[in-house]
Amino acid sequence: MPNLPDYDLKFDHPQLEGVTVTMGRLTIAENFEFEDIITMPTTNREERRTFIGVLAAFVGAHMVAWNLTDKDGKPLPVGQIEDHLLLRQIETGWLQGLTGGQTASPLDAGAGPDEDFEAEIPVQPLPEPSGAESETAG
């Protein structure tokens, strides 16, 4: 049986032009962990700081590859996310990939931890492998 593809994120945000990130698939337990993270309270500065740290660690641990380099052109280690814009775009794009392109997670009916954050169509999920679609009997 072939492996399911990872999520290849390409960003339309002008500050992230040319950046590509490949995120791994999640187990059911990891999906619930991701849901717990993205629904963490962020009503004050300390909660927001905790949220960003936990989100960065989770995203970094599930990152497969990216094409980022330092100012000398040397590849940056995968998963060491220190840029807030990149982190939030990865979060939004990966979530859209995991939920089949929906803009909001079906697991979270609310606006999420950062209500004023808007993604700019950040993801183009990899195509489904042939034969992955099931037919329903009717």
Image: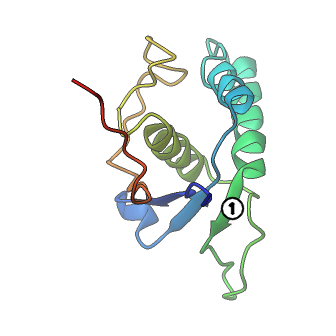
Left-right relation of 23 to 108: right
Q: Quadrant of residue 15?
A: bottom left
Which percent across, then down, holds residue 92? 48, 40
Which percent across, then down, holds residue 13? 37, 57
Which percent across, then down, holds residue 126? 43, 59
Please, is residue 91 above or below residue 5 in the view? above
Secondary structure at numbered mark 1:
strand
The residue labelled by disc 1 is 64
Residue found 77% across the figure and 26% down from its top: 50
21 or 17: which is nearer to us? 21
Left-right relation of 104 to 26: left
Q: Quadrant of the C terminus?
A: top left
Left-right relation of 130 to 4: left
Q: Quadrant of residue 91?
A: top right
Residue found 37% across the figure and 39% down from its top: 134
The residue furthest front is 137
The residue furthest left is 138
Please, is residue 65 above or below residue 122 in the view? below
Residue found 67% across the figure and 23% down from its top: 32
For the residue marked with disc 1, what is the amino acid? Answer: Val
Q: Quadrant of the N terminus?
A: bottom right
Q: Residues within 10 Å of mark 1 (few under 14, many from 20)?
A: some
Residue found 76% across the figure and 58% down from its top: 80
Left-right relation of 121 to 63: left
Which percent across, then down, holds residue 114? 50, 25
